[in-house]
Amino acid sequence: MLMGENITLTEPAARIALFIGKSKYLLLLFKILTNSVNIFHKRINRITILLSACCKTYCFAFQKRRFCTVKAAVLQRKTAAFAVSNRNYRFSSE
């Protein structure tokens, strides 16, 4: 595709161009023509969908692991913050 080259759009392509905007459509068309489309993003989504369909316990364990890690990190900070505030309150009341 050369700069300044006229592009003839079919009816479905014209509808897509109107929906997503002409500049985004031309960028997508350029990526498709130059074979620079990222195919790994689609493959990762397919793997995730297949894992969730076949191995539900794995997905639940994965979600639980992420939640517990975040929860532990948040609780450590909160208990440290509460310990400091309680100690300061005790010293100010004595």
Image (tube, rainbow, N blue to C red):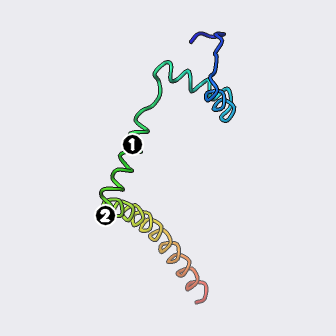
Q: Is residue 48 above or below residue 55?
A: above
Q: Amino acid at mark 1?
A: Ile
Q: Estimate how packed mark 2 is, as few (under 14), some (14 to 19) or many (20 or more) residues with alpha carbons within 10 Å.
A: few
Residue shown at the point (38%, 39%) measured from the top left:
43
- Asked if labels 2 and 1 touch by Cβ distance under 8 angstroms, the answer is no
Quarter holding residue 64: bottom left
Quarter the N terminus occupies: top right
Residue shown at the point (56%, 84%) measured from the top left:
91
Q: Residue furthest bottom?
A: 94
Quarter the C terminus occupies: bottom right
Quarter holding residue 25: top right
Residue shown at the point (31%, 60%) measured from the top left:
58
Res 75 label: none
Report the residue marked by disc 1: 44
Residue shown at the point (52%, 77%) measured from the top left:
82
Q: Estimate how packed mark 1 is, as few (under 14), some (14 to 19) or many (20 or more) residues with alpha carbons within 10 Å.
A: few
- Distance CA(mark 1)–CA(mark 2): 19 Å
Report the residue marked by disc 2: 57
Q: Is residue 29 above or below residue 78?
A: above
Where disc 1 sits, the SS reads helix
Q: Amino acid at mark 2?
A: Thr
Left or right: where 44 falls relative to 8: left
Residue 20 picture location, percent across and down: 65, 34
Residue 52 picture location, percent across and down: 36, 56
Q: Nearer the viewer, residue 89 or 80?
A: 80
Q: Residue furthest front?
A: 11
